Image (cartoon, rainbow, N blue to C red):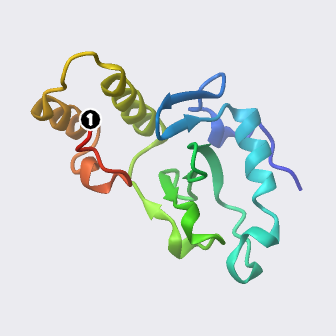
Amino acid sequence: MPISPTDPRFRALPDATREVSADVRAFDAATAARVSTEYLDHGYWEGLEVDRRWLVIGDNPIGDHWLLGPDGEVWFFDHNFGERAVHLFEPLQISVAEWLMMAHLLGRAERATAPIDPDRLTAAIAAISPDLAERWPYELDSL
């Protein structure tokens, strides 16, 4: 059964799919529903055990996925693992809104024409969620 774009879990997603930063393309509800339905195929899951509670809410150019978990928080799946399994998903312990805030912050830092003050960036990330910089799946030192 396909996932509906009207699923209330998609309410915090943007109105249109957009690349927010180099590592975050946030899906709109219709795209999230379509991609999530696609990844419910048994062939994508380790041991063919599909967990339907996980929704794909974004990706990046190298094929990693941002997931909305059954706990209502955002998780990360590294495509290098190949097949999906819940034990391979990394918890970020943030909401969709906080995930989008982090992506916008990183996108702004990526587009900056002057060097970013690392202390200000660290403080801004911590304001979104304490220790988020340590949980974020990508290196932040290059910003």
Q: Residues within 10 Å of mark 1 (few under 14, many from 20)?
A: some
Number of labelled discs? 1
Q: Residue 112's image quarter?
A: top left
The three-letter code of the residue at mark 1 reads Leu
The image shows residue 124 at horizontal and vertical percentages of 21, 31
Q: Which residue is pictured at 22% across the width and 35% down the height?
A: 127
How far across and how far down the image is residue 74, in percent?
49, 50
Q: In the shown orientation, is residue 18 left or right of residue 106? A: right
- Image quarter in which the C terminus is found: top left
Residue ranking furthest to the right = 1
| Residue 1 on image: x %, y % | 89, 56
Mark 1: secondary structure: loop
Determine whether, in the image, residue 119 is placed left or right of residue 44.
left
Nearest the viewer among 75 and 109 is 109
User: What residue is rendered at 42% in x and 60% in y?
Assistant: 91
**Extreme left residue here?**
119
**51 vs 55: above or below:** below
| Residue 2, percent from left and from top | 86, 51
Mark 1 lies on residue: 143
Residue ranking furthest to the top: 113
Residue lying at 58% horizontally and 61% vertically, measured from the top left = 79
Q: Identify the residue at image location x=58%, y=59%.
A: 70
**Is 84 in front, or is 117?**
117
